[in-house]
Structures are given as structure tokens and as C-alpha cells.
Image (cartoon, grey):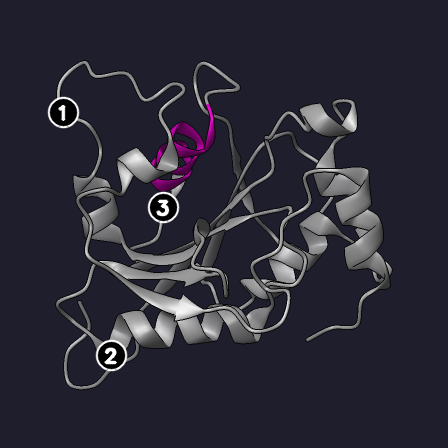
Amino acid sequence: MPTGGEPLRIGAVVLTGGTGARMGGVDKSALEVDGGTLLERSLAAVSAAAEVVVVGGRRPTSRQVTWTVEDPPSGGPAAAVLAGLDALRLDVDVVVVLAVDMPRVGAQTVGRLVAVAEADPTADGALLVAPDGRRQPLAAAYRRAALGSARPAGDVPTHGMPMRRLIASLRLREVTAVGEEAQDIDTWADLRRLSTSADS
């Protein structure tokens, strides 16, 4: 951990490997909102990260990233997050986890999450919470050591594990979403709505 008031070192894991089942199996990362693909919007949101790991299929990107996939594939978000964590090569203090289908999460959102995590050294991180109280564990800043320690011990499989189970033991601060930050794209109707709404 940094000492003497040094800022936290940040890495990021961006998840793109969802099946998009309710959208006919479309590659969500290639969908566009406001003239940019969801993947590029996610990369812009984590622009402060020294290293970004993208969990999912390879495609051209505007910045250098590390690519990985969970093994076996299609293991769900918890397995993907742990695969991304394992792929990080730099020594970072905080790992920002972001699902690619949350286009209203921007750099300011990520900055708020990191700031809240940094302000409370006893917390294991901070996650975004919708105004209705719905927690978004895939829009969060986790202390790397805490997230690593949440990995199930022994031979407990992570394939198919819900994200909420992975982070159940972590002490997380909640950051209330502004505007549509906590909205994700699960359907074509979601895409149309978020594509026509103004940035918050």
C-alpha cells in the first residue's frame, strides 16, 4: 500500500464476456451508445488505471489492454473477475471492476468509487448503488488484496458463482449512483433508452 499520502495505484478489469441472451446473443461490447462502442466507453471510464484487463473476446482497442478469458469460458461474472484479477501484471492497490454494458459509468463515476475506497482504509472497497438500493458489484473499486482473499478456498468451483456470493464477506462502502450510472443494458429497449438519454 502507498505510504505518506501517496495515491492508490489503480488497475481495472472490464468484463465483456456476457452471453447477451436476452438480445439474441449479440456481442454487447460492440454495441454503440453516443457514437462509441460500449467497450470504448468502458475503457474511457477506467482511463486512470495503470493497467486494464479485458475479460472476453479480442477486438481492436484505443489503448493497450491485457486480454484473458475465464477457464472454462462462460463461467459468469465472478469467475471472469477472478480471471481478470489473475491476469493483472502490475502491482496495484485497487482494482476497478466494470461490466461493459453500463454506458453511463464514466471516469467521474470511477473517480468517486476510488475516492471512497481510499478515504476508508478499513473498507475492502466501494460499489455503486442505484437510487432504489440495488447494488452493482460490477461497478466497483475493490482493494486487490481483499478481492483476492474472497476467492473460495480449496476446490470450490467459481464457474457459475454469483458475484454477490464472491463478495459476501467483503466490507464495502456504498456510493449512490447519479442519474443513470447504475443502469445496464440487458435488452434492446435498454439500449434504445440509454442511447437517447442525455449524459448525467
Residue 78 position within the rendered picture, expressed as x and y whole percent measured from the top left = 38, 33
Residue 28 position within the rendered picture, expressed as x and y whole percent measured from the top left = 72, 38
* Residue type, label 2: Ala
Residue 86 sits above or below residue 62 on the image: above
Closer to us: 46 or 167: 167
Per the image, label 2 sits on a secondary structure element best described as helix
Q: Which residue is mark 1?
A: 153
First-in-chain label (1 vs 3): 3
First-in-chain label (2 vs 1): 2
Q: Which residues are magenta?
A: 76-86
Quarter of the image with the C terminus in it? bottom right
Per the image, label 3 sits on a secondary structure element best described as loop
**Would residue 154 be found to the left or right of residue 194 on screen?**
left
The span from disc 2 to disc 1 (Cα, nearest Å) is 30 Å
Instruction: State the image quarter where residue 57 is shown.
Output: top right
Q: Which residue is mark 3?
A: 89
Q: What is the crowding at mark 3: few (fewer than 14 residues within 10 Å), some, or many (at least 20)?
A: few
Q: Residues at badges 2 and 3 in contact (C-beta under 8 Å)?
A: no
Nearer the observer: mark 1 or 3; the answer is: 1
